[in-house]
Image (cartoon, helix red, strand yellow):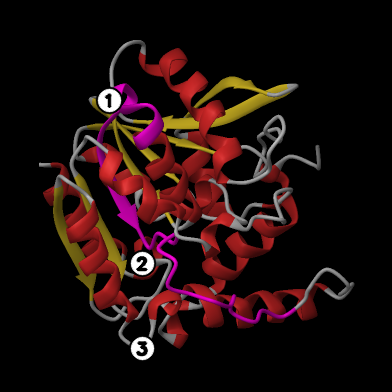
Amino acid sequence: MSRPLAEDLPPEALSLLRQATRLTTPCGDGDMVWHAWGDGEPLVLLHGGSGSWTHWIRNVATLAAAGRRVLVPDLPGFGDSARPPGNGDADGVVPVLAEGLPYLLGMQSADIAGFSFGGLCGGLLAAAHPELVRRLVLVGAPGFGLREKRLTLVAWQHLDDPQARANAHRRNLATLMLHRPEAVDALAVAVQSANVPHDRMRRRKLAMTDILLRQLPGIECPVDAIYGEHDSLYSGGLLDQVEQLLRSAAPRFGRCVRIPGAGHWVQFEAAAAFDQALLQILG
């Protein structure tokens, strides 16, 4: 395990962390680390690839204040959580989530919102363990088989100069995560800089397949979606295709909300609009 994530986090994240309750559930030879805010009906937020709980840094306080118990893990192989046993992709994460949620919730099911890789994990979990998921909200989720290539990102691992690393992270955020140049702010760069060195799941491939699409017909709970209007994964009209696939494949599909002016990391770039949309979906 690398050094604790908190040693690399910016002050905004540390302040939020001090307000949370830290929880752990089994994960391979170690633990899966969770952070919880608020009280009420459980809402589980799953972060994206190369991320941690901090992908939700601008959302947890608002969602908790709205009367939810907000539970946000570092998914296996990210942040402070141990790697999952065996498979290092979304389908390897699902058994760890399925084992851990009853530790936290007993027999209660939860609403789950999953961002990007977390949406893929949430969809696989809902299909395999319907008793655990009351409602699934996909946020910028991949797994529809619509993309042939990954976006080209700048390498940063070889850079020793902190400013050069920060500049690489800034460029990658602009390429993949955020639409408006001003959204690539100091907090975004600090969160990205802290998170990516803790990614021990770098050989993930399922996001480039149609695995989520194939699971949708078997998902019994209501399914909704929130995407940034300018999500870099689905430029060139692909977002229209995503919505069509969701409507045709998910038996209980509700709404696909598109947030104007936002990119892939929609809950960060347009936090207020995202929180409002999510709370409306959750009712």
Relative depth, front residue between 179 and 242: 242
Q: Locate residue 238 relative to residue 99 in the image: left or right.
A: left
Name which residue lies at 80% across and 42% down.
3
* Mark whose residue sits in front, 1 or 3: 3
Relative depth, front residue between 74 and 89: 89
The residues bearing labels 2 and 3 have C-alpha atoms spaced at a distance of: 18 Å
Element type at mark 2: helix
Counting from the top left corner in percent of width and height, residue 206 is at 56, 55
- Residues shaded magenta: 127-154
Name which residue lies at 41% across and 82% down.
179
* Mark whose residue sits in front, 2 or 3: 3
Counting from the top left corner in percent of width and height, residue 177 is at 49, 72
The residues bearing labels 1 and 3 have C-alpha atoms spaced at a distance of: 41 Å
Q: Is residue 98 above or below residue 259?
A: above
Q: Amino acid at mark 2?
A: Val
Q: Is residue 107 above or below residue 74?
A: above
Q: Is residue 149 above or below residue 61?
A: below
Quadrant including the C terminus: top left
Q: Which mark is residue 236?
A: 3
Q: Amino acid at mark 3?
A: Gly
Q: Locate residue 77 relative to residue 17 in the image: left or right.
A: right
The residues bearing labels 2 and 1 have C-alpha atoms spaced at a distance of: 25 Å
Q: Residues within 10 Å of mark 2 (few under 14, many from 20)?
A: many
Q: Which mark is residue 39?
A: 1
